[in-house]
Image (spheres, helix red, strand yellow):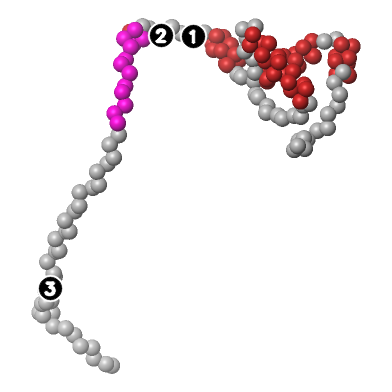
């Protein structure tokens, strides 16, 4: 057997030499925050704060939700003969003279309502009086 060298038990460990702790680097102050303009807060209204809130019946809430819904709008484009387009402008002027300025889209919607209110015979006569127009964009002239 090989003999192993044993360390003497009385031998003390040599103290480990440590470097002194380095001083932390001087901290730079944080960059200044951009200033925001103060927002003017409205003064609280004393009337509402002191007045007790009246309970709203559930039926009224349901009615409000139904009334608040707006119809979905659809955007479309179409081709129209210049003569009929000029009639739209004349109708706009007529409405303005009568004290009710009107947009083209309002005139078209009024025309649709008038057509919908006609009887079948009147409707077919009105639609038959309008010549068909080639769809698409007109050629540049």
Q: Residue 27 at x, y = what percent?
A: 19, 53
State the residue in front, 21 or 100: 100
Q: Residue 24 at x, y = what percent?
A: 16, 59
Tag 2 near tag 1, CB within 8 Å: no
Q: Residues within 10 Å of mark 3 (few under 14, many from 20)?
A: few
Residue 28's place in the image compared with 53, above or below, is below
Magenta segment: does it hold 138? no
Q: Residue 61 at x, y = what percent?
A: 54, 12
Q: Secondary structure at mark 1?
A: loop
Overall secondary structure of the magenta stretch? loop
Q: Which residue is mark 1?
A: 56
Specify whether 44 is left or right of 117: left
Give the residue at the far bottom of this rendering.
Answer: 1
Mark 3–mark 2 distance (CA, rounded to whole Å): 77 Å
Name the mark on residue 53. Answer: 2
Residue at the image point whose x is 56% and y is 9% from the top: 59
Q: Secondary structure at mark 2?
A: loop
Specify whether 109 is left or right of 10: right
To which quarter of the image does residue 106 belong?
A: top right
Q: Nearer the viewer, mark 3 or mark 1?
A: 1
Name the mark on residue 17. Answer: 3
* Magenta extent: 37-49
Mark 3–mark 1 distance (CA, rounded to whole Å): 81 Å
Looking at the figure, which quarter contains the C terminus? top right
Mark 2–mark 1 distance (CA, rounded to whole Å): 9 Å
Magenta segment: does it hold 44? yes
State the residue in front, 5 or 25: 25
Q: Residue 100 at x, y = what percent?
A: 63, 9
């Amino acid at each position: 057997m090989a003999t192993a060298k044993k360390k003497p038990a009385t031998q003390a460990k040599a103290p480990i030499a440590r470097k002194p702790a380095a001083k932390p680097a001087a901290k730079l102050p944080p960059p200044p925050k951009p200033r925001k303009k103060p927002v003017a807060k409205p003064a609280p209204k004393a009337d509402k704060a002191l007045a007790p809130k009246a309970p709203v019946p559930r039926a009224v809430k349901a009615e409000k939700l139904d009334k608040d819904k707006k119809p979905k709008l659809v955007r479309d484009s179409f081709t129209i003969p210049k003569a009929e387009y000029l009639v739209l402008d004349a109708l706009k002027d007529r409405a303005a003279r009568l004290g009710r300025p009107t947009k083209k889209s309002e005139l078209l919607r009024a025309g649709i309502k008038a057509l919908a209110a006609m009887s079948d015979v009147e409707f077919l006569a009105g639609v038959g009086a309008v010549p068909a127009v080639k769809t698409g964009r007109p050629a540049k002239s």
